[in-house]
Image: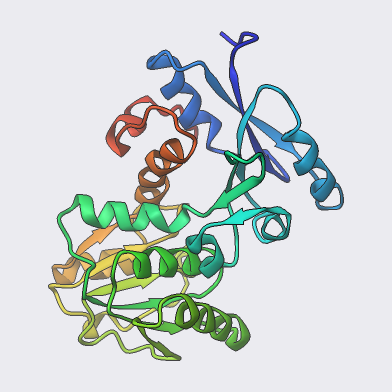
Amino acid sequence: MISGNTKLIAHLGFPTHSFKAPLIYNPYFEKNGIDAVVVPMGCRPDDYKAFLKLVFRLSNIHGALITMPHKITTMGLLDDISTNAQVAGACNAVKIGSDGGLVGDMFDGEGFVRGMLRRGREIQGKRAIMAGAGGVGSAIAASLAKAGLAELALSDASFPMMQGLVDRLRRHYPGLHVEAGKTDPDGYDIVINATPLGMNDNDPLPFDVTRIAPSAFVGEVVLSREITAFLAAARARGCEYQVGTDMLFEQIPAYLEFFDLPTTTAAELRAVARLRG
């Protein structure tokens, strides 16, 4: 039940029909007696800058989840921005700080990192290669760098996008060795597809899977199907892997911690979620 004491978490984006967060957070809150609720709020881009400031003037607002197309715009509306968000160049969570200012962070990549660590895989000192330097790729790169990755090779169809991420990584993590334009996965410990390749049956593979070592950890971001052709090929090689939806569920505990709410595990969230389709 929603009462006058319920903590309101706005889910800001447009359009709202594909929002999955309320179907995960709210069943978890209900099961655990947490007096909070995630509410989808469809805000058009032209209204967003004014609306974000206004929504945080509500007396019962607790925070906001930010999704497309507002993640980049949000960066210019904050008073305090985490390193993860600065490297990613985007923000997907906002709360009010102790001084009353707006604090922003980015958790898209945290889900990937937490999934790896939960499986007992190491990131500290390892070498990774990733196809895709857009929104999700930038977030994963930021979280891998934060976790102590030693080397990251990147490729993307957009050179300016790739170079922008390279520059941000080098600025915030000068000890991280970053290579741009590399696509051969041979010798890398972690291999990541952060592109849309795999959503369609006839998509090419993001990497030559025969060049991936069976000992490598392979990650996917595509959410529309659990086992993409890329993951199927990596699995056949003997690689341990992570599906796209793992990243979704693994990042929610990080959000809960950011919002100072009781946290949980990805397994519990999967068990209570009411996702459809």
The one nearer the camera, 134 or 263, is 263
User: How many marks are shown on the rendered structure?
Assistant: 0
Looking at the image, residue 58 sits to the left or right of residue 137; the answer is right
Q: How is the image coloured?
A: rainbow
Q: Is residue 215 above or below residue 31?
A: below
Task: List the single residue furthest toward the front.
Answer: 99
Looking at the image, residue 212 sits to the left or right of residue 94; the answer is left
Name the quadrant containing residue 70.
bottom right
Looking at the image, residue 177 sits to the left or right of residue 97; the answer is left
The one nearer the camera, 109 or 54, is 54
Point 39% across, 54% down: residue: 110
Percent across and percent down for residue 255 are 46, 41
Is residue 205 in sight in this rendering?
A: no
Is residue 172 in sight in this rendering?
A: yes
Point 39% across, 63% down: residue: 143
Point 23% across, 87% down: residue: 186
Percent across and percent down for residue 28 are 41, 24
Percent across and percent down for residue 174 are 40, 82
Quarter the N terminus occupies: top right
The one nearer the camera, 155 or 265, is 265
Name the quadrant containing residue 241.
bottom left
Point 45% across, 17% down: residue: 34
Q: Is residue 265 above or below residue 181?
A: above
Q: In this view, does 272 lie above or below 181?
A: above
Looking at the image, residue 187 sits to the left or right of residue 2; the answer is left
Percent across and percent down for residue 38 are 58, 28
